Amino acid sequence: MFFDLSQLKLIRKKLKITQAELAKKAGISQSMIAKIEAGRLIPTFTKAKRIFEALKSFERGKELKAGNIMSKKFYKIASSDRLSHAIKLMQKHNLSNILVFDKDKPAGLITEKTILKAFAYFGKNLSQIQAKEIMEEAPPIVARNTPIEKMFDLFQHFPVILVGDKGKAEGIVTRTLFISALHV
């Protein structure tokens, strides 16, 4: 999108951002934004470029936060549960993975790949295996206010990311939710 500084206030309001938010993202003062919007100041090329880059960032939705795109509904099993229970839940709810918890804390993750590896190792007798015996590393927990752009790297290593506070999961972001948010 082409930005015209004479239309800065209109563009900013359309993006639903404050002068302070734009100034912070652009690395300039809020008073400078106010002066530009009032027509009392023409910024240097460098500062105008930073404003345009900040506007583009807001426009692309990069300021979406993990809490905005998370689902509060997620499925979990206890680490002492049998693998057969995990498989039944995954089939019933069409899941490719399921979280493993110890009390209220995430302990691990069981994925389709985990189950296939367990089958290769243990054979058909998976029903007696506990989740804790084969689970993968627990997915990371990010704060609700984590910008989604910070989650790109995590999705290279984990199929899901938990959202919460102080080690307690409040929601989940799957790759599907993440990709959907990028196309909003």
Image (cartoon, helix red, strand yellow):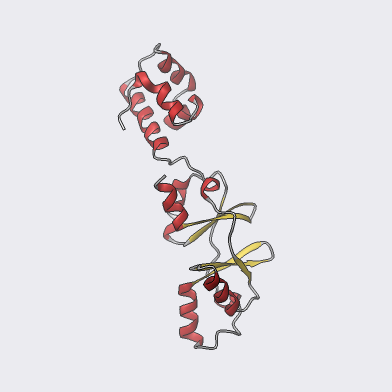
Identify the residue at image location x=45%, y=84%: 120
Looking at the image, residue 13 lies above or below residue 171: above
Residue 80, x across and y down, in percent: 65, 75
Horizontal side of residue 93 vs 149, given as left or right: right
User: Could you tell me which quadrant the C terminus lies in?
Assistant: top left
User: Could you tell me which quadrant the N terminus lies in?
Assistant: top left
Residue farthest to the front? 92
Whether residue 27 is visible to the viewer of this picture, yes or no, is no
Looking at the image, residue 144 lies above or below residue 77: above
Residue farthest to the right? 103
**In terms of image quadrants, where is residue 78?**
bottom right
Looking at the image, residue 166 lies above or below residue 97: above
Q: How many marks?
A: 0
Identify the residue at image location x=46%, y=40%: 63
Residue 106, x across and y down, in percent: 61, 63
Residue 109, x across and y down, in percent: 54, 68
Residue 125, x across and y down, in percent: 55, 88
Horizontal side of residue 11 vs 165, given as left or right: left
Identify the residue at image location x=68%, y=62%: 104
Q: Nearer the viewer, residue 66 or 44?
A: 66
Whether residue 18 is visible to the viewer of this picture, yes or no, is yes
Horizontal side of residue 85 vs 157, given as left or right: right
